[in-house]
Image (spheres, helix red, strand yellow):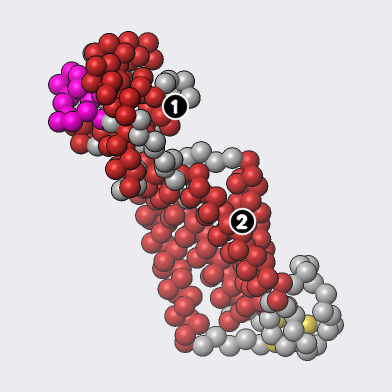
Amino acid sequence: MERNDAVMPWVAIVCAAIMWIILLFLFNKETAPEPVVVDPAVVANISKEVPTVGKSVYEANCSGCHGLQGQGGAGPALAGNEDITKDPVYVHSTIVKGKGAMQPFGDKLKENEIYAVANYVLNSWGNKIEEPLTPATVAAGQAKVDPEVLKNRSRFVPDHIQLPEIFLATFVMVLLTYGLIGLYSVWTEGVELHPGIHKVRSSPMAMLAMLTTLALTLLFSVLFVRQMVTDYAGWGAAEQVMPNVTAEGFYAAMILLLLALATGLYKKFFMDGEVLVEDASGEFPW
């Protein structure tokens, strides 16, 4: 008889893959840039409104964090900031959608106010762009894909995620975990069993696999500790450096996976087993 059945784990993994594809479409919809409607009246008034409307909107909504002269404060400095003058569309998208602790102003400001304040920032305190930022500029920039969109898509999950996506992502992870544990169980124990003691003799390949796994576990443990020490030092430095959470998580995950693999290798190739009664039942439904 077979101790384990791999059918249900495979079904779980296939279902998880299908739901993950659906989830990626939802993520893509959330992070895709919205189409821009070019209003000729807005374009004509942009240059006129920069020194008046732009300045008043900035002082009322932005100066509290970025400073009256763009010197920075709770928010980053805008004065003499080459990063924003190189990509004016980024300024527009940040005002509309917000970023980090900065709230979005897309629903709070009128369209002409958004372009006025964006051009005010891009042409004040040492900043200067050749042509004013217009809806046409934003539309052209969106054709290249907003850098913020690319950053958001490069994350494991987007910055702004809603309850349906959270539920679906959780269900995907449950199914995936169920399937992987099932296949892992089948691999380590899925053999024909009969009453009696089953002696296991490891092969040279099994020994090499075990040594390689343990060596990699040690390597990733060292890398994890080094990353933690580096991040801790950066966090406490005068110029605070954000920790590299992605690297920390990757190293920790690799350690856990390699330890699980080492356990499986030991159970399959090194540990003797004993069967007292032929029984198809088990702790899991696979």
Residue at x 48%, y 81% (from the top left corner):
207
Viewport quadrant of the C terminus? bottom right
Q: Position of residue 153 (x, y in %)?
A: 43, 49
Q: Quadrant of residue 152?
A: top left
- Residue type marked 2: Met
Q: Out of 96 and 177, give the one closest to the viewer.
A: 96
For residue 139, side relative to residue 188 (left or right): left
Residue bearing mark 2: 173
Residue pushed farthest front?
40
Residue 225 visible here:
no
Q: Out of 238 and 152, give the one closest to the viewer.
A: 152
Residue at x 47%, y 60% (from the top left corner):
254
For residue 37, side relative to residue 87 (left or right): right
Considering only order in the chain, which callout, 1 or 2, is on the residue closer to the N terminus?
1
Q: Position of residue 88 (x, y in %)?
A: 26, 33
- The magenta-colored residue range is 118-133
Using the image, tell me which numbered label, if any, was put on residue 67: none
Figure check: 121 above or below 167 = above
For residue 33, side relative to residue 179 (left or right): left
Using the image, tell me which numbered label, if any, was put on residue 106: 1
For residue 140, side relative to residue 27 (left or right): left
Label 2 secondary element: helix
Q: Main secondary structure of the magenta part?
A: loop
